[in-house]
Amino acid sequence: MVKMIFLGAPGVGKGTHSNLVAEAHGIVKISTGDLLRENVKAGTELGLKAKEYMDAGGLVPDDLVIALLKDRISKDDCGKGFILDGFPRTIPQAEALSGITEIDLVVNLSAPEEVIIGRLSGRWTCKKCDAIYHELNIKPKVEGVCDKCGGELYQRDDQKPEVVKKRLETYQKDTAPLIDFYKSKGSFIEVNVEGNVEEVNKRVQEAINDKLNG
Ligand code: AMP
């Protein structure tokens, strides 16, 4: 049983690396961003409330996200543990989480701001299967078309340049304080994510295994 949190600015690759680590440990990966997007797509009451905050690059109110997360981690598939990607995003969320469950390890993915901006601007998403591409380094074989399912690629509202800027400001103001919050609590590691995905993932997996086994 292992429970981890992945922290980091938007664009550091939390989604990619947490998926690979979850696979390696045989545990589920939970992304509040994915859960919220599912709700938006399905047109639920929560989705309708969340959409305006998401489209503007801000945060969905704590009470909504905390309830969503609490419900998700109570499911049977979390019995062996889980990785949280994109939660907590504020100190009140972190405090609520500590009242719900214990966390074994916090992994902070870091990169210089210019690297993050380069990665975030130029992202495109598949309308059908949500796969993510990048103009510079993850190009689809045919422009505007998903390699995996043939769906049409588009820029999500939160991938547009002005919203990217707002998301980074939101990260600095609300989420970056979590680094000190968790550092002071103990089991915390930081991994630099510059480099290609395979290289960085190896670094991430090794750092995690060293910490968990050491
Ligand atoms: P993500 O895919 O993690 O970048 O999340 C996409 C958007 O969903 C964010 O920009 C927020 O608007 C919202 N969101 C995701 N997770 C949270 C959270 N823990 N607290 C508040 N808003 C969130």
Image (cartoon, rainbow, N blue to C red):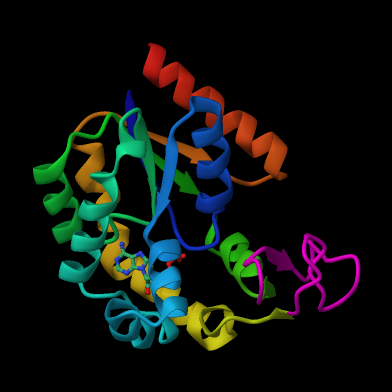
Ligand 1 quadrant in view: bottom left
93 relative to 194 in the view: left or right: left
Q: Residue at x 25, y 38 (%)?
A: 183
Q: Residue at x 50, y 43 (%)?
A: 18
- In reply to whether residue 185 is colored magenta, the answer given is no
**In x, y percent, where is residue 94?**
19, 52
- The residues colored magenta run 127-152
**In x, y percent, where is residue 203?**
59, 30
Q: Is residue 106 above or below residue 206?
A: below
User: Quadrant of the image for the N terminus?
Assistant: top left
- In reply to whether residue 137 is colored magenta, the answer given is yes
Regarding residue 106, the answer to whether it shows in the image is no
In front of the other: 159 or 149: 149
Q: Is residue 187 above or below residue 172?
A: above
Regarding residue 161, the answer to whether it shows in the image is yes
Extreme left residue here? 99
Q: Residue at x 82, y 74 (%)?
A: 145
Extreme right residue here? 142
**In x, y percent, where is residue 122?**
69, 75
Q: How many marks?
A: 0
Q: Residue at x 72, y 44 (%)?
A: 196
**In x, y percent, where is residue 10?**
48, 63
